Image (tube, grey):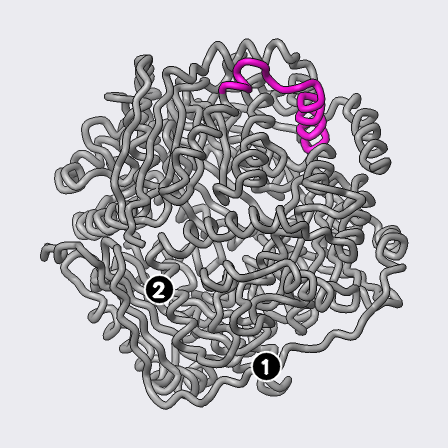
Amino acid sequence: MIFRLSFFSLLLLAFALPNATLAEPSKVFTRTLDNGLKVLVQPDTRAPVAVQQLWYGVGAAHEPPGQTGISHVLEHMMFRGTERFPGESFSHTISSLGGRDNAFTGRDYTAYYQILGRDQLAIAMEMEADRMQNLLLAEADLQKELEVVKEERRLRTEDRPEASAFEQLQATAFQNHPYGQPVIGWMSDISQIDQKQLRDWHRRWYAPNNANLVVVGDVDPEQIFEMAEEHFGAIPRHEITPAPRRQEPVQKGTRNVSLHIPAQTEYLLIGYKTPVMAQLPKKQRWEAYALSMLTSILDGGNASRLPKRLVRDRKIAASASASYSLYSALNSLLVLDATPNPGHTAEEMEQALLAEIAELQAQPVSETELQRARAQVIAHMIYAQDSLRHRAYMIGMLETNGLGWEVEQQLVDGYQAVTAAQVQEVAQRYLTDYTRTTVTIHPLNVAKVPAP
Amino acid sequence: MIRILAASLLAFAISAQAQTGPRIEHWRSNSGTPVFFIAAPQIPMLDIQVVLDAGNSRDGALPGLSQITHSLLNTGAGDLDADAIAQQFEDVGAAYNAEVLLDRSKVSLRTLVDPEWREQALATFTMVLGKPKFPETQLERRRQQMQVALKKLEENPGAIAKQAFYQAVYPGHSYSSPIVGTEDSLAAITRDDIEGFYRTFFASGGAIVAMVGAIGRTEAEAIANRITQALPQGPAPNPLPPPSAVTEAKTVVIPHPSEQAHVLIGQQGVARGEAFHFPLYLGNYTLGGGGFSSRLMQEIRNNRGLAYSVYSYFFPLRHRGPFRLGFQTQKSQVDQALEAAYAELRRFLADGPTEKELEHSQNSMVLGFPLRIANNASMIDYLSMIGYYRLPLDYLDTWTDRISAISHEQIVTAFQGRLDPDQMITVIVGGQSQP
């Protein structure tokens, strides 16, 4: 494949647009209030709507053992009202204005969002500022909400074999590092979360200096800065005591977990401990791009190696995929997974995936594959412009994880610079028997699948 | 509290303004296929959807036939094999997809508009749609893949409940055809079946083309002509016969080793384009559609802590699509939750929304209208729906007016006309795990 267009001219294409404010679609305006709240605004005038996201720098990775899931329970309780906006009046008000609201909790963050008409932002901001400080956390609500969260855990994890396997992968790979803890929390931990713990958690982490406010949409940055000052400006900053650093002890060999649960097919997960951009010194950041490139070469579309070789050519897998969290705050896992076709086994999946890794270590990847991965990164950067929510998500997540929103703009350059030798080097360095954990699902109570 | 009052007054003031949708251009391609286009010059990308009258309700005697046909399109076409097709798309960053729904299917492409990149993506897309070869070896592979997909569905109590629900609401009708097929049908499907399905249901006479992106009308016309000429030339397939009414209440209980029971309640509801659709849609916002504000959410989740997710919706189709109310809860709480859900349903059928609830739902929908069409991805989905169901071209322009004009009485009449709690299907799957 000849690369018909230089990266630069393609990006120019994205910038050379008729609409004035979209002429620089990636421009982010920022201001930090005196109390430490950072406000980030990205205008987009295509429609009279806006997305507001308020990101707090607290998530599952900040939780002490025994209190796993507390960030997520607090997220739920944030919708149970304050004195000024009691009960469900936050969501009710947003919906009466035609907006939608919700929240999400991750390992590194808790974020709240509203999508609504650009003229309705002030009320959303006022209510967010109010619940940053004045959350009720009523006992009766909490008892109900804990039951809701337990049902959520049953729905998302207990009754989903692949999600259970993923939870086991993290918990086994990380013995002290907090990414071993599930975001939703262990069932017994959820049961023992109480009002006082939640109050302390809210006080400790929900401060303007531990938050980023992101607005993307048909707005004027100056007006947003003024509005943020009006609603959040008076909230005092307070010292954030960071969670104790929980260093992962050195792994001394491959870890294997066999999971015997009700399921219909065998399933295999492999995780390799890998560094992420946020934890690498600047001059070593290429390693994170190289690991991301490696992941694309395995599973960046239908032409990549896993779908081509395991699924189409050898026909041993019904599906096979790879993922790597380039932007997470702490070192994480590069994950491979595969589901065998009838007549094939999880063990064959493991051998096939390990053979793919061995090949990446032994031979440089082709220039064609590198170019294909780069083309996709460029295209998807442009496609991503279509979703306000995604853009706000990227800005908020990169800021909260300590990388800065600018990092996304460097992705194309980062990918452009990765060489075949670098991909080989990170494969050799990080994808080893001493960084590997494997989880296999052996279906309970299911007869062996017949040979084809 | 004063702030909320002010906000709702503001909402009122704004809801008086009618809101219009984006400018939709419509014409027929030179093979007679309807084309719908919205110019969106801001981002240098183009979305194309070819919408076919080829959903899984067209499976006939072979459930899974639509899905397997669609999944084979990109595994060999013209002189390209599966690898070459994938490379042609991905070398230029294009995203190809084929999705099967109940009535219709959508084969779609997202590409950059740069002429050379776009040309490569379009040439490949046209080949995949117009010259698929359905290679035997790929068919065998897909067959196995779907057998695994079928197994995965059997792991999932929610998916089992959905299948049982459709079977009970549409007995003997193709709306209950399981999308990934059955063990027997997957074993039986042949290459001839697939070719036959393609010739009949991919015909240009039954297709529509929707496009949103940074191109001009002339370019859009040329692209539509090229795509529709490549499709098998022929008339639209015969209309799908309507389902027969189900008038008897029925409870289906299926054991499954899950911790939660998945519960679905419902019956046949409303067809796309019927007068009842808008009152039902608006009324359901209050009952179970309006996210955190709905009565079901309030009663079952917030007040009782019985479920994480609880909802109701109407799913309008060519014929009467289902009304469906659903939740998941621990086995020991199923009776309590069922009782609460039926109580809310009966109460709503008897009295409809309160005046305040009606006002809230109308404000929410009218003020929230711009969110529905705020980006290219949502606009092409509306084009696809308007085109396929032959809705009027001003559907989006009149949408907020139609919502604003609905009365309490119209909602009650529509709900009572279509739902009868004494004729409901109830499906309960799972919750049989040992403590």
The N terminus of chain A: image quadrant: bottom left
The chain holding disc 2 is A
The chain holding disc 1 is A
Give the answer, above or below, for where A86 lies relative to A392: above
Secondary structure category for the residue under label 2 = helix
Amino acid under disc 1: Gln
Q: Quadrant of residue B11?
A: top right
Q: Is residue A405 magenta?
A: no
Q: Is residue A23 visible in this depiction of the protein? A: no
Q: CA distance from mark 1 to mark 2?
A: 26 Å
Question: Where residue B85 appears, x then y in whole percent?
Answer: 35, 54
Give the answer, above or below, for where A364 lies relative to A318: below
Question: Where residue A314 appears, x then y in whole percent?
Answer: 21, 64
Q: Is residue B204 visible in this depiction of the protein? A: yes
Query: Crowdedness of circle 1 by 10 Å Cα count: few (<14), some, many (20+)?
Result: some
Q: Residue tagged by mark 1?
A: A279
Q: Quadrant of residue A241?
A: bottom right
